[in-house]
Image: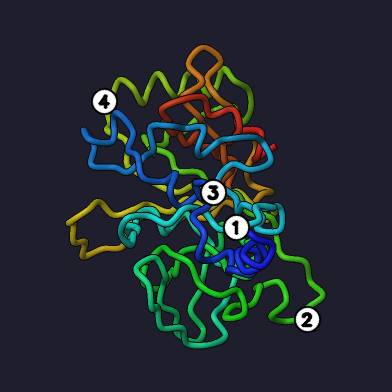
Amino acid sequence: MSQDNKEIARLIPIKNRKPHSVPSLADELGDLSPWSQETDSTIDSDTERYYPSIDSGLSLVSHHNLHDSTISSRSASPVTLPPSKLELLEATHRSLHKFIPRHFDEVELEIGDPIYVSNEAEDLWCEGVNLRTGRQGIFPSAYAVDVEYEDLQTTTPKPKRERFLLGYLGSVETSAHKGNAVICQAVHKIRQTQHRPHSCILEVSDEGLRMVEKSRPGQHRKVRGLDYFYSLKNVMFCGFHPREPCYLGFISKHPNMQRFACHVFLASESTRPVAEAVG
């Protein structure tokens, strides 16, 4: 190749090259757990995707830590994530301008759309999910702004949040308010009732624990699913079953009375990261 041809090849935009594949968090949320098919829930079978480390859990993957020079490999067709997966993603960016896709792997944006960005490349293109439409694809980075810079006047730090997709089995009243023995007894009682787990999101923050039930596919509810918040001061203990770590329990105190309840959850693998996130 001549020197001039080499120079022309160097000027070809990176966007048109076919980079190596780098799976995003949204791509990794596709598989269902072995027991979710029995219960119509949406727990992922690969719990490591939800509990990769104590620091991450289901919390947002910082887009600033991605150093790939190009965006991930373009898929053969556009991808639309189901609502059950979109609930696990939080917006990292907001759309500043309307973007109309011209290629199959690009995602449409409207002004103000919330976006989860999984990859920012050096060629000034981003890969992510439009949380309004559920469409996953690429778009120019100039069309979105980091939500952390939307309000520069705000000095109040945002509370740290981690989300975990679990199966809620039920709650039982207890006489004691801490200890693994209480968790084991609660798990034993719940198992005797043979309750099926209900898919829910357990959100852990500096303010407390929030438990939100996820609706099953195709199910129409006249009454809203459970949405409970337990203030951190009323969460007395959280731990996993020492012999069967797939079971998790946390003990809460009644806000006005000396009564305690243990809330039991099930995952496909160890729930240690969840317990350690609660602290």
In the image, farthest residue toward the top = 243
Say what secondary structure mark 2 lies in. loop
The label on residue 48 is: none
Q: Residues within 10 Å of mark 1 (few under 14, many from 20)?
A: many
Going from the N terminus, do you reach mark 4 or mark 3 first?
3
Whole-angstrom CA distance, mark 4 to mark 1, is: 50 Å
- Tell me if residue 208 can be seen: no
Residue position for label 3: 163
Quadrant in which the N terminus appears: bottom right
Q: Earlier in the sequence, mark 1 or mark 3?
A: 1
Near mark 4 (Cα within 10 A), the count class, few <14, some 14-19 or many ≥20, is few
The answer to whether mark 1 and mark 2 are in CB contact below 8 A is: no
Residue lying at the far front in this picture: please name it. 2
Check the image and report above or below for 96 versus 121. below
Going from the N terminus, do you reach mark 2 or mark 4 first? 2
What's under tag 3, amino acid-wise?
Arg
Total labels: the figure holds 4
- The reply to whether the C-beta atoms of the residues labelled 2 and 3 are less than 8 Å apart is no
x, y (%) of residue 233?
Answer: 69, 48
User: For the residue marked with disc 2, what is the amino acid?
Assistant: Leu
Label disc, if present, on residue 70 of the rendered structure: 1
